[in-house]
């Protein structure tokens, strides 16, 4: 069988990612949310690439596009990532893992090579969790862990997940059929940009992920008293936004004090009745807390909640804290990690092992089967930003390594 041409694969991946990156809800920034017309258009494009690669294409009830290449047994290697984006995001975060899977599977399908296992390339639609309050719905459905209670959750556009699924042309009753049988799903592999600076700093194009950081999400809502900005004396105010501002700086200070063990971010702030001449009476914010240590993350959350209550007390603000996420750190399978490391060596890299601060569909798939992730260097470690970039050369090396991983995998 022909040796993979990494340069050609990298150029093809670059062209595919740029084409996919042009499918957005807005002309001047990349927004592609779950179960939207943009998701539909992207799914159709990916389905056409999978068919051109001689893969058998299907879609499940939560919109995951699946490209299948049959093997000699019923076992399957699942290779996937997501095609939804954050708001004003980059075009590589997610799509590169799907494109890499398609081009790697094509390498075997085009040669008519039957491996000891089949390959399923999976394009998930809900990893970023931008439209709906929770995330990983589509990979959870594949893993058989989707909680139907989530169907009643309402997205930021006021549409429930159930209605969005129906509007997308799928039937929520078919969700259970999306789950892989455990004796079919042999392993899951995801190729993803690092979204951090380590590989670039160490001058390595590829790396092996040893674990995906755990996450806690807190929805914090302050209830003060709306008032006239010009007439209410400062000492008589119950300013919900001032309370929220204290909490944002508190998150930053407490996380800095952990000296890197925990990171905390407030990227979403909502002021329903925002007006420059009104003292904010109601403010809601979402706190994203991550750590490679579940113990450290839980300790942080407990201490942080106590401090938030103290802020509300001092300012006589009403307070609700709702925890919407508590996702454990997900270890990657040691044997699969070694397989990825051997494949990276085979393409001339030194397989650095590093943790992922970012979340991935692999966290959901780990409930189904052993998982592995391969990281690709991205310029400046920038991600969730239109400046996100991975070079065709590095992407080609990653696809070449993925092909070698598949070639040598014992599943
Ligand atoms: O938030 C994350 O880590 C992922 O990009 N959804
Ligand atoms: Mn991602
Ligand atoms: Mn992301």
Image (cartoon, rainbow, N blue to C red):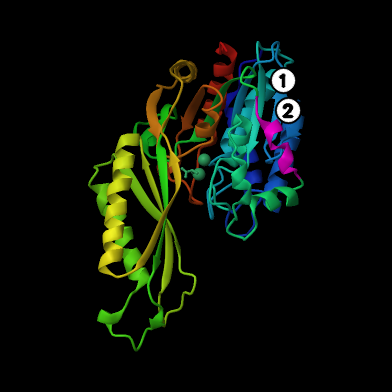
Q: Is residue 56 above or below residue 278?
A: above
Secondary structure under tag 1 reads helix
Height in image: 177 above or below 306? above
> Magenta segment range?
170-180
Q: In terms of image quadrants, where is residue 77? A: top right
x then y, percent, for residue 274: 46, 74
Q: In this orientation, does residue 102 appear?
A: no
Q: Position of residue 71 (x, y in %)?
A: 70, 14
Q: Nearer the viewer, residue 56 or 187?
A: 187
Residue located farthest toward the bottom when viewing the structure as drawn: 231
What secondary structure is found at the residue carrying circle 2?
Answer: loop
Q: Is residue 145 left or right of residue 233?
A: right
Position above or below: 256 against 56: below
Residue at the spot of label 1: 109
Which residue corresponds to mark 2?
53
Residue 85: percent from left, percent from top: 57, 48
Residue at coordinates 41% horizontally, 78% vertically from top-left? 226
Quarter of the image with the N terminus in it: top right
Left or right: 248, with 347 as reference point: left
Residue plotted at (64% across, 50% down): 161
The response on whether ligand 2 sits within 8 Å of label 2 is no
């Amino acid at each position: 069988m022909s040796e993979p041409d990494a340069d050609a694969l990298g150029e093809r991946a670059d062209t595919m990612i740029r084409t996919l990156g042009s499918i957005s809800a807005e002309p001047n920034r990349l927004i592609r949310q779950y179960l939207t017309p943009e998701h539909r258009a992207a799914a159709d494009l990916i389905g056409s690439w999978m068919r051109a690669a001689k893969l058998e294409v299907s879609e499940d009830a939560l919109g995951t596009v699946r490209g299948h290449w049959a093997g000699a047994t019923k076992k399957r290697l699942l290779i996937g990532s997501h095609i939804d984006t954050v708001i004003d995001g980059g075009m590589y975060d997610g799509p590169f893992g799907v494109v890499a899977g398609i081009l790697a599977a094509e390498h075997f399908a085009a040669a008519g090579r039957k491996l000891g296992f089949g390959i399923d390339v999976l394009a998930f639609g809900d990893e970023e969790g931008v439209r709906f309050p929770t995330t990983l719905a589509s990979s959870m459905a594949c893993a058989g862990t989707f909680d139907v209670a989530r169907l009643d959750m309402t997205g930021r556009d006021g549409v429930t997940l159930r209605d969005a699924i129906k509007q997308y042309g799928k039937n929520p009753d078919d969700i259970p059929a999306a789950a892989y049988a455990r004796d079919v799903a042999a392993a899951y592999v995801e190729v993803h940009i690092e979204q951090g600076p380590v590989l670039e700093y160490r001058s390595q194009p590829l790396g092996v992920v040893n674990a995906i950081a755990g996450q806690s999400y807190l929805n914090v809502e302050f209830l003060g008293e709306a008032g006239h900005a010009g007439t209410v004396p400062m000492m008589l105010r119950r300013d919900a936004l001032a309370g929220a501002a204290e909490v944002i700086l508190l998150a930053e200070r407490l996380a800095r004090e952990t000296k890197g063990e925990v990171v905390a971010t407030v990227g979403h702030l909502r002021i329903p009745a925002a007006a420059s001449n009104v003292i904010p009476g109601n403010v809601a914010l979402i706190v994203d807390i991550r750590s490679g240590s579940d113990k450290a993350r839980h300790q942080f959350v407990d201490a942080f909640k106590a401090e938030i209550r103290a802020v509300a007390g001092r300012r006589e603000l009403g307070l609700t804290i709702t925890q919407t996420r508590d996702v454990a750190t997900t270890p990657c399978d040691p044997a699969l990690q070694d397989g990825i490391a051997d494949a990276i060596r085979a393409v001339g890299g030194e397989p650095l092992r590093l943790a992922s601060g970012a979340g991935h569909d692999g966290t959901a798939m780990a409930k189904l089967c052993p998982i592995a992730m391969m990281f690709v260097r991205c310029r400046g470690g920038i991600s969730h930003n239109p400046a996100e970039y991975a070079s065709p050369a590095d992407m080609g090396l990653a696809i070449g390594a993925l092909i070698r991983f598949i070639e040598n995998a014992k599943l």
